[in-house]
Image (cartoon, grey):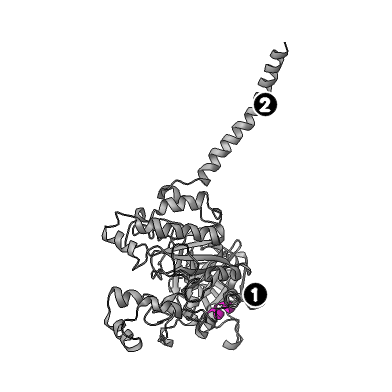
Amino acid sequence: MPEVAEKWRFRVAALLLLPLLLLEVAKSSLWGSGRRYTPDWRSLDSRPLPVWFDEAKFGVFVHWGVYSVPAWGSEWFWWHWQGEGLPQYRRFMNENYPPGFSYPEFGPQFTARFFEPEKWADLFMASGAKYVVFTTKHHEGFTNWPSPVSWNWNSKDVGPHRDLVGELGAAVRSRNLRYGLYHSLLEWFHPLYQLDKKNGFKTQNFVNVKTTPELYHLVNSYKPDIIWSDGEWESPDTYWNATGFLSWLYNDSPIKAKVVVNDRWGRNTSCHHGGFYNCQDKFQPQSLLDHKWEMCTSIDKNSWGYRRDMIMADILSESEIIWELVQTVSLGGNYLLNIAPTKDGLIDPIFQERLLSVGRWMNVNGEAIYSSKPWRVQFEKNASVWYTSQELAVYAIFLRWPENGILNIISPITTPNTKISMLGIQGDLKWVERQDEGLLISLPLLLPSALPVGSAWTIKLVGVE
């Protein structure tokens, strides 16, 4: 009898626990499909983009490496000089360096002597940026951290003798900014990459020995918020084992919940696969996309790396930067603006000024940018007024101040509760609505010097449809 009683107790307990077990199985099935990703693009592309990235809107890009030593032409200096053999680069070397000088000899001159990460981070914070993307390694192969597979061609062994990635990351994060790492998959002159290239990328010597170990090391050592991949264009994603790495990143890495990646994981992936799309450098769509994207551009129009020979005509103006930012956000994108420090670790005053000008504009107009969403209409037909929206407000950002002081917009539909104001100016603005002309808003009668910003002003509309 005791045995029978024990069996019944076990059965009753099992029946009582069964609903809980079934619930846990259901949860596991439901959540598992959202948390585990297989190494194929269909699965990886289904991962929701972490919300923080869309809310951030504006970031600063930093290109810094050994190419900052010759500081001439562009960050592709080594390739243009010895890969393509362009005459102007050969002439530059002949006129400025001794015969037989090799590119690796620039390495010790990349000193970062005046690099002060805290001051950099202060500047980035003052710019209004919410994230920073820093070059860990460009196509030249020099790593800005002590990579275990880049012996004597990294910032700890050569030049600065410092962990540049780690130092900047600590400073940036202490200011509650997100930290992203740019990483080039390829290296122009690495022998193993050249061997794989010669083999038609049927072998993966370089990937197994160099690229993959470095990606894992970066993730585990620095836990970046963004992995900004580049250098993918010569070979397919299968050569780079891209889907295998990303499935680990999304499933099992220490940053699986927060990390964001771009779309440069093979010559067939750009603008098709990945987290957010870059598509191409300085990508500017003309209409709203159905996928999150980012425009990356550089204050120096002709280079991403520092150039000693840049002139003012090569530099984006304050208004050009603000206009690009506004248009990008209106169309659902993020705006990543590049600066290029010198070999010593100094940021040129013109780059500082441009970043600070964005910060001043954001201090007044950030409400219309951060965490905003595209509105049902992105811009007026004349393309001088661009829209964003928050929960209960629509923002009309106009790029040119009308000569008569009357802003005419036709897209918003007013209601009895409509209120209109201008960011940076106290009080409501007067307005009228006319059937044939749309909404006519009387702008503040102020001298240009008294306006809150010098270009791109924001009208806030509440209670419109």
The CA distance from mark 1 to mark 2 is 64 Å
Q: Which residues are magenta?
A: 355-361
| Image x and y of residue 129, in percent | 56, 71
> Where does the image place residue 253, in percent across and percent down from the top left?
53, 52
Rendering coords of residue 420 (x, y %)? 61, 72
The residue at which mark 1 appears reads as: 428
Q: Quadrant of residue 18?
A: top right
Please tell me the numbered disc located at residue 34. Answer: none
The residue that mark 2 highlights is 16
Q: Is residue 132 above or below residue 344?
A: above
Residue nearest the viewer, comparing 400 with 330: 330
173 on left or right of 245: right
Closer to the camera, 337 or 95?
95
Quadrant holding the N terminus:
top right
* 260 sits left or right of 284 in the view: right
Residue found at x 41% / y 85%: 310
Q: Residue at x 45, y 53 (%)?
A: 246
